[in-house]
Amino acid sequence: MAGASDVKRRIKSVENTRQITKTMELVATSKLKKATERVRSARPYADSLAQIVSSLYAPELSDRFPLLRSPEHPNRVAVLLLTANRGLAGGFNTNLIKEARVLLENFDSKGIETDLHIVGKKGIAYFRFRGRRIASSNVDIYDSPSLDDAESIISGIRDDFASGHVDAVYVVSSEFRSVLSTPPSVLELLPIRPKSESSSFDNYLFSPKVDVLIQWILPVYLRNTIYRALVENAASEQGARRTAMKSATDNASDVLEYLTRTYNRVRQAQITQEIAEIVGGAAALE
């Protein structure tokens, strides 16, 4: 059994660790509150915008608007993976990377070429280590993503689709349902598909003209969809980190309780031994 001094050093070490994890839990909780507010603000506008774009879609428009083209058999696709720059968030990054890997392997098995675009150091490090070619990478997205961040991510991919370099665009990100539920999801961003067969711009009256409206709204829709994915990803990351740090803090408390009992037993045994030696010494002097 370890001596009392060794156990005491371990107790001090675990106390320091618990203090760190507790602090990280509190920081994540604070950031999570702001992140969930951004998610709640982004969703209604994003849903309405997606509904409008879906209603505007018509096959005959693809000749005039490259972003509305819909190839039947894609030969090359772009996959955008959103991860975090930091770890200590449980399985958050691992689950996203796994989802992207499955998607890429599915395209590989069908002979479809892929352009992999990654946001976040964790995803970049994983695929670089495995020798996967990365078309673009971005590590400058932090806890409070902006529309400018979304535009910097989607602009090149949007141009690739419009020029015909890629025939589809998929986004792998985390869906924020609650603090304890942040599953990875795959969104087919392009081509745009109508929600129903009856959706057509002929059913509406537009001002300005429909061509002007579509020309303006498509880039806005794509940018806003990426922005929503970024804010949901940020909220999911903070939720996962808060859960992971709370679990680590609770585990440290359990270890401290065990070590404290161990220390008390060791110390009691030492005191008992010292008393026995004193009594034995006194008896020998009589």
Image: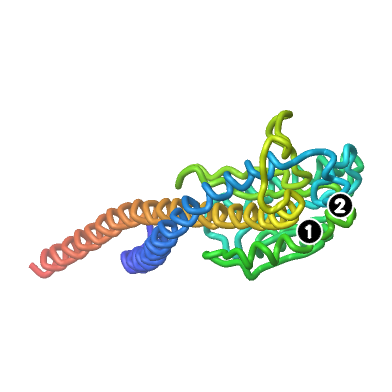
The vertical placement of 154 against 95, above or below, is: below
Which residue is painted at 66% across and 65% down in the image?
121
Question: Does residue 10 appear in the picture of this structure?
Answer: no
On-image quarter of the N terminus: bottom left
Q: Which residue is mark 1?
A: 157
Q: Give percent across and percent down for residue 154.
A: 72, 60
Question: Does residue 39 appear in the picture of this structure?
Answer: yes
Q: Residue type at mark 2?
A: Val
Q: Give percent across and percent down for residue 185.
A: 64, 43
Which residue is painted at 92% across and 42% down in the image?
111
Is mark 1 in CB contact (under 8 Å) with mark 2?
yes
46 and 113: which is toward the camera: 46
| 186 relative position to 161: left or right | left
Q: Which residue is mark 2?
A: 166
Other-residue count near label 2 (Cα within 10 Å), few / some / many at <14 / 14–19 / ≥20: many
Which residue is painted at 82% across and 60% down in the image?
159
Q: Residue type at mark 1?
A: Ile
Which residue is painted at 65% across and 62% down in the image?
150
